[in-house]
Image (tube, rainbow, N blue to C red):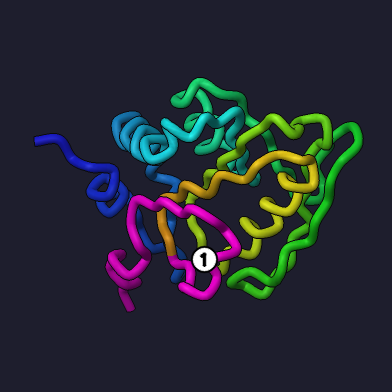
């Protein structure tokens, strides 16, 4: 019997110092391949031209999903890293830790003909995803939605993100051991 991405994610996740650690997903080739395939699946017929991701796990997952879908990858960088050229910049609302992030996209990466999917590991508040949508749309591109491993997004935040497809809701993850 073949395990689903959901099953593999649940067996890979571990708790460290009260935080869910998703990095083991990347270490196992079968788990990573299954996760990437299942993240891509709901978007195969969306006529995508690009997948974007926010550093760091969004770079890994987004790049892999882009290859799976046969489209290019567009990086969304946080402040601090080298990123030449004209950029579109937005600051996110506070995330689950209360932090705001300045997210940057190279303006020349997207245009009016582009249809873009964002891929990431986890949606908590959706603050970074909303900022990504804003930079994508500021370039004239069409936002298609989000593909994520874990979805913890409140219902009230969903309308601002469009289609959200996840491998599992956060409520299905066993709680952190005391």
> Looking at this rendering, what residue extends furthest in the top direction?
70
Q: Along the horizontal axis of the image, is 175 left or right of 146?
A: left
Q: Which residues are magenta?
A: 152-178
Q: Residue at x 47, y 26 (%)?
A: 69
**Which of 85/97 is in front?**
85
Give residue 92's position: percent from left, percent from top. 73, 63
Q: Is residue 153 magenta?
A: yes
Give residue 46's position: percent from left, percent from top. 48, 35
> Looking at this rendering, what residue extends furthest in the left direction?
1
**Which of 127/80 is in front?**
127
Give residue 141's position: percent from left, percent from top. 71, 39
Q: Describe the element under mark 1 as helix, strand or loop.
A: helix
> Pointer 1: what residue?
158
Q: Along the horizontal axis of the image, is 15 left or right of 172?
A: right
Label 1 neighbourhood size at 10 Å, few (<14), some (14-19), many (20+)?
Answer: some
Give residue 148's position: percent from left, percent from top. 46, 50
> Looking at this rendering, what residue extends furthest in the bottom direction?
178
Q: Is residue 69 magenta?
A: no
Q: Along the horizontal axis of the image, is 162 left or right of 31?
A: right
Give the answer, above or below, for where 133 lies relative to 65.
Answer: below
Q: Residue at x 74, y 34 (%)?
A: 112
Give the answer, above or below, for where 123 lies relative to 94.
Answer: above
**Which of 168/27 is in front?**
168
Picture quarter with the C terminus: bottom left
Give the answer, above or below, for where 99 lies relative to 82.
Answer: below
Figure label count = 1
Q: Residue at x 81, y 36 (%)?
A: 106
Picture quarter with the N terminus: top left
> Looking at this rendering, what residue extends furthest in the right direction?
86
Q: Residue at x 35, y 71 (%)?
A: 176
């Amino acid at each position: 019997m073949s395990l689903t991405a959901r099953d593999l994610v649940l067996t890979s996740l571990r708790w460290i110092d009260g935080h869910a650690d998703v990095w083991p997903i990347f270490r196992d080739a079968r788990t990573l391949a299954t996760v990437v395939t299942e993240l891509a699946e709901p978007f195969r017929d969306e006529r995508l031209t690009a997948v974007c991701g926010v550093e760091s796990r969004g770079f890994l997952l987004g790049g892999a999903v882009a290859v799976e879908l046969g489209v290019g990858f567009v990086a969304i960088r946080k402040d601090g890293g080298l990123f030449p050229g004209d950029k579109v910049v937005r600051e996110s609302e506070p995330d689950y830790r209360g932090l705001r992030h300045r997210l940057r996209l190279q303006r020349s990466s997207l245009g009016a003909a582009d249809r873009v999917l964002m891929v990431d590991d986890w949606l908590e508040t959706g603050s970074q995803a909303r900022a990504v949508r804003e930079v994508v749309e500021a370039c004239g591109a069409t936002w298609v939605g989000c593909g994520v491993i874990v979805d913890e997004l409140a219902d009230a935040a969903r309308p601002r993100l469009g289609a959200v497809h996840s491998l599992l809701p956060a409520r299905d993850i066993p709680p952190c051991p005391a």
